[in-house]
Image: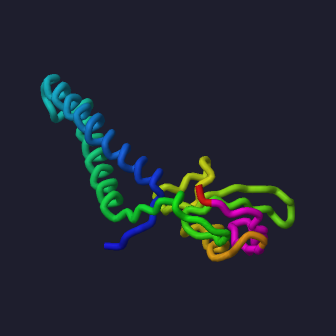
């Protein structure tokens, strides 16, 4: 059973998602199943079958989140420091071709979200910059071709 790194914020979100499933979604679907049963013949009751299917999905989500929860190795990024890129770092990158600036935080696999500018530690960009320092260049093998980035800033927040 392998542990995987996760930020405190990611852990808290996982915990909130699990609580919502257990305390809100599960009781609501149990109520929906009970109501659907009251409509009569279960063999042709679409509401009942839909609710049972939803219940199965909720239960599988709960099991999956509990597994992630138990295997998470929580790392408090605010206690880290330095100019070398490692897990939890928020890194400012400058594309060496276009001079475009991008800011990414390196997080665990289960909390990556491009919209929030969080990339997985196992992503190509993270693998290319981990271990490097401010001022270093990194070559990233991207689906659209190789890109070169300069590491402009490394911070831990």
25 vs 115, left or right, is: left
Is 145 located above or below residue 20 in the figure? below
Is 8 located above or below residue 147 in the figure? above
Residue 30 at what x, y percent from top left?
A: 20, 34
Q: Tell me the residue at 85%/59% (across/down).
A: 99
Is there any visible trace of residue 128 in the rendered image?
Answer: yes
Front-lying residue, 73 or 100: 73
Residue 146 part of the magenta-drawn span: yes
Q: Tell me the residue at 52%/61% (across/down).
A: 79
Magenta residues (range): 136-155
Residue 76 part of the magenta-drawn span: no
Looking at the rendering, in which quadrant would you find the N terminus?
Answer: bottom left
Is 140 located above or below residue 99 in the figure? below
Front-lying residue, 32 or 134: 134
25 vs 130, left or right, is: left
Based on the displayed image, in which of its 4 quarters is residue 21 positioned? top left
Residue 54 at what x, y percent from top left?
A: 29, 40
Residue 142 at what x, y percent from top left?
A: 69, 68
Q: Tell me the residue at 79%/62% (across/down).
A: 94
Residue 65 at what x, y percent from top left?
A: 33, 54
107 vs 40, left or right, is: right
Secondary structure mainly formed by the magenta segment: strand
Based on the displayed image, in which of its 4 quarters is residue 151 positioned? bottom right
Is 84 located above or below residue 153 in the figure? below
Is there any visible trace of residue 50 in the rendered image?
Answer: no
Q: Tell me the residue at 18%/25% (across/down).
A: 35
């Amino acid at each position: 059973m392998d542990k995987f790194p996760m930020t405190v914020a990611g852990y808290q979100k996982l915990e909130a998602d699990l609580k919502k499933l257990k305390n809100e979604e599960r009781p609501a679907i149990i109520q929906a199943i009970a109501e659907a049963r009251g409509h009569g013949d279960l063999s042709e009751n679409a509401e009942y079958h839909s609710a049972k299917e939803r219940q199965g999905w909720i239960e599988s989500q709960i099991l999956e989140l509990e597994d992630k929860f138990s295997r998470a190795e929580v790392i408090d990024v605010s206690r880290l420091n330095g100019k070398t890129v490692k897990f939890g770092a928020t890194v400012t990158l400058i594309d060496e071709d276009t001079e475009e600036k991008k800011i990414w935080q390196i997080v665990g696999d289960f909390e990556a979200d491009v919209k929030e500018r969080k990339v997985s530690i196992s992503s190509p960009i993270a693998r290319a910059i981990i271990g490097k320092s401010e001022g270093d260049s990194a070559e990233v093998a991207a689906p659209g071709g190789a890109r070169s980035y300069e590491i402009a800033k490394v911070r831990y927040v």
